[in-house]
Amino acid sequence: MEREEAVRKLNKLVNRELHELAEKYNVTIYRDDKVNKGWAGHVFERYLGLPINSAQSPNFGSWELKSIPLRYKKNRELTFKETMAITMIDPVNVAQKEFKDSHLLSKLKKIVVVARIVGNSVDDPSFIHSVVEFNLEGDIYNAVKRDYNLVRSTICDYSKGFDALTGRMGYYVQPRTKGQGHGSKTRAFYARPRFLKLFINI
């Protein structure tokens, strides 16, 4: 399925309740008494008629599907519940490639994001808010390029290196530990809420 067709079809789900769709498409929310963390994405895949991919970020060739949760604060203001993982950081690849040829830019060009409003628990109603594609142009492109170059220069600096990457870096895109605990050696690029707000109208 091509990206344009997927976006068009996913937009028909806006304002629909996700639990009802999970039941319709036989997607289990709990697995062995634990929450199936990928259940929302599995609903969208089943809806699109695509085979469920065991990878954390299903890749459909010319595009990639991601789901991001939104929540209401106490003042009823809608906000992002978390940052959004974009792609893992391979230090060798980042050191070798400029932003225009980077895996980060390639990923951002392919992503289709389904934003959904969630409650305090997985059992609370969850409504599909919007479907968006990222369009990096002008100032936004240059700002993300600066974030990437900061990561790249840190990796290439022998006095710093890969282990010096921290979530405090980056204006729109941050390099952050991915995995369990502070001892994790892996890093990934994450989209900050201020970046997501550029495309997801909340």
Image (cartoon, grey):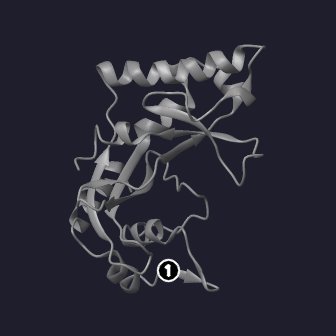
Q: Is residue 118 or residue 58 the one in the foreground?
A: 118
Please state, as top left, top right, bottom left or bottom right, where the N terminus lies in the image. bottom left
Amino acid type assigned to the residue bearing label 1 in the image: Ile
Residue 172, by quadrant, is top left
Q: Secondary structure at mark 1?
A: loop
Q: Residue at x 39, y 18 (%)?
A: 142
Residue 140, by quadrant, is top left
Could you tell me if residue 158 is visible in this image?
A: yes
Q: Is residue 24 above or below residue 48?
A: below
Q: Is residue 195 or residue 99 the one in the foreground?
A: 195
Q: Residues within 10 Å of mark 1 (few under 14, many from 20)?
A: many
Could you tell me if residue 2 is visible in this image?
A: no
Image coords of residue 173 (percent x, y): 48, 33
Q: Is residue 119 or residue 101 the one in the foreground?
A: 119
Image coords of residue 39 (percent x, y): 49, 72
Q: Residue at x 30, y 41 (%)?
A: 197
Image coords of residue 29 (percent x, y): 50, 80
Image coords of residue 130 (percent x, y): 26, 56
In this picture, residue 135 sits left or right of residue 152: left
Q: Is residue 51 above or below residue 195?
A: below
Residue under label 1: 29
Labels in figure, total: 1
Q: Residue at x 29, y 48 (%)?
A: 132
